[in-house]
Image (tube, helix red, strand yellow):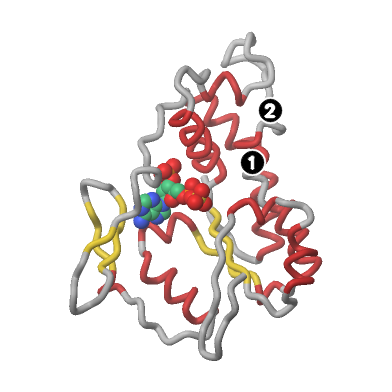
């Protein structure tokens, strides 16, 4: 981490920290007063997003449905189960890593950001982040606009000089169409895990 001067905040973003077993202990050893932020989204969309990212790097990757089902030779309408060890599925079981972080850090120091709301109302979620970090609410709704080409909100870097900035091509990819019964089965799979996460966090994310 770079040296932080008086009046500065150093931020670091590494998605894999969330699930790395040794991370809470190591982060605590580095600075027990650190503030943590995690963005969580519907685990089904997360799994598809994760797969889409891999597919964009490897042409000819088998279909999502071929990975997500344990017995791929079974009929989709039959009795097959979800492969919970496949990383795109496993990483959407948020209660497990969340519990690990809570063993080291108080709940008040780990802000959970709702990924769906971050897209629908980025200013509202950014207000929560700024309050959490003890910052003035400098970033407001005036800093965001919806870019219909991108299909996502983009940033206006400053109120006066409205230079638009959207996230790059690797964020906001088109997702493949997934078989509806596979989606249904995935939703059933996540239901108890989501409930556990809502209970632990005290936040009902209302994922379908
Ligand atoms: N404003 C804006 N613009 C573009 N994309 C946005 C935005 N806000 C949230 N998202 C969602 O961010 C998803 C990619 O983030 P990741 O979590 O995969 O990024 S990272 O791996 O942690 O760096 C990305 O997932 P995909 O849609 O699957 O590409 C987006 O849904």
Image position of 110 with respect to 83: above or below: below
Q: Quadrant of residue 10?
A: bottom right
Which residue is rendered at x = 44% and y = 55% of the image? Answer: 116
The location of residue 50, given as percent across then percent down, is 52, 38
Q: Nearest the camera: 93 or 180?
A: 93
Which residue is rendered at x = 52% and y = 85% of the image? Answer: 134
**Residue 200 located left or right of residue 14:** right
Q: Secondary structure at mark 1?
A: helix
Residue at the farthest bottom position: 6
**Residue 74 located left or right of residue 13:** right
The location of residue 207, given as percent across then percent down, is 53, 49
Which residue is rendered at x = 57% and y = 16% of the image? Answer: 76
Q: Where does label 1 land, which residue?
A: 190
- Looking at the image, is mark 2 or mark 1 earlier in the sequence? 2
Which residue is rendered at x = 50% and y = 60% of the image? Answer: 114
Q: Nearest the camera: 180 or 150?
A: 150
Disc 1 crowd, CA 10 A, few/some/many (<14, 14-19, 20+): many
Using the image, tell me which numbered label, if any, was put on residue 141. none
Q: Quadrant of residue 160?
A: bottom left
**Residue 196 located left or right of residue 177:** right
Disc 2 crowd, CA 10 A, few/some/many (<14, 14-19, 20+): some
The location of residue 40, given as percent across then percent down, is 55, 55
Q: Where does label 2 land, which residue?
A: 83
Q: Quadrant of residue 108?
A: bottom right
Q: Secondary structure at mark 2?
A: loop
Q: Nearest the camera: 2 or 162?
A: 2
């Amino acid at each position: 981490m770079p040296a932080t001067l008086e009046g500065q905040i150093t931020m670091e973003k590494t998605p894999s920290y969330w699930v790395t077993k040794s991370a809470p202990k190591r982060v605590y050893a580095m600075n027990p007063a650190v503030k943590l932020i995690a963005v969580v989204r519907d685990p089904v969309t997360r799994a598809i997003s994760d797969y889409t990212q891999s597919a964009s790097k490897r042409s000819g990757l088998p279909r999502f449905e071929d990975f997500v089902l344990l017995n791929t030779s079974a009929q989709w309408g039959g009795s097959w189960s979800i492969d919970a060890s496949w990383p795109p599925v496993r990483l959407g079981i948020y209660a497990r890593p969340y519990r690990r972080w809570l063993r080291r850090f108080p709940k008040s120091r780990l802000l959970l950001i709702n990924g769906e709301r971050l897209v629908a109302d980025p200013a509202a979620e950014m207000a929560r982040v700024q309050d959490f970090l003890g910052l003035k609410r400098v970033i407001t709704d005036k800093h965001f606009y919806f870019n219909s080409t991108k299909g996502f909100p983009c940033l206006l870097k400053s109120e006066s000089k409205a230079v638009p900035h959207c996230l790059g091509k690797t964020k906001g990819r088109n997702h493949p169409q997934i078989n509806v019964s596979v989606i249904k089965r995935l939703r059933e799979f996540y239901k108890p895990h989501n409930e556990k996460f809502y209970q632990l966090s005290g936040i009902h994310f209302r994922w379908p």
